[in-house]
Amino acid sequence: MNTENFIPINTLCQHYKVEINFFHNLNENGLIDIQLVDDIQYIHKDSIYEIEKIVRMHKDLDVNIEGIDIVLNLLQKIDALQTELHKVRNRLLLYEN
């Protein structure tokens, strides 16, 4: 497997100054997906945005893994509702004109 689009977890641990168990807990709770290649654990680079949000919530706000899961689910629901609201507004504009 080509690891060009993946970042080793050890690198992320050093960068964010967190323990490797933090990433294992995130993986166990389904918040991230860890790939194992040649006995090295990787995370896809597309997950970095989510990981940064998670690390900020954990370190800056002292939110635990379960709380992070809840917050991320609520943020997804908010995004879905905003998208739906935008579609409804656009439809309403069609009928107003």
Image: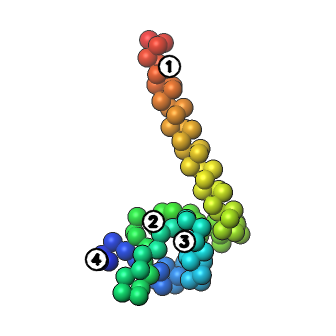
Q: Give the answer, above or below, for where 15 lies relative to 97.
A: below
Q: Position of residue 45 (x, y in %)?
A: 40, 69
What amino acid does circle 4 point to?
A: Asn
Instruction: Say whether marks 1 and 4 touch (CB < 8 Å).
Output: no
Which mark is first along the chain, 4 or 3? 4
In the rendered image, which residue does mark 1 sit on?
Answer: 92
Of discs 1 and 3, which sits in the foreground?
3
Residue 48 can be seen in this image: yes
Residue 27, label in figure: 3
Looking at the rendered structure, the kind of residue marked 3 is Asn
* Secondary element type, mark 1: helix
Residue under circle 2? Answer: 47
* Mark 4 or mark 2: whose residue is earlier in sequence: 4
Q: Name the residue beneath numbered marker 4.
A: 2
Q: Residues within 10 Å of mark 4 (few under 14, many from 20)?
A: few
Of residues 97 and 67, the one drawn nearer to the viewer in this rendering: 67
Place of residue 23 in the rendered image (x, y in percent of width and height, measured from the top left): 55, 76
**Of helix, strand and loop, which one carries label 4?**
loop
In the image, 1: left or right of 54? left
Disc 4/disc 2 C-alpha distance (Å) = 17 Å
Image vertical order of residue 95 relative to residue 78, above or below: above
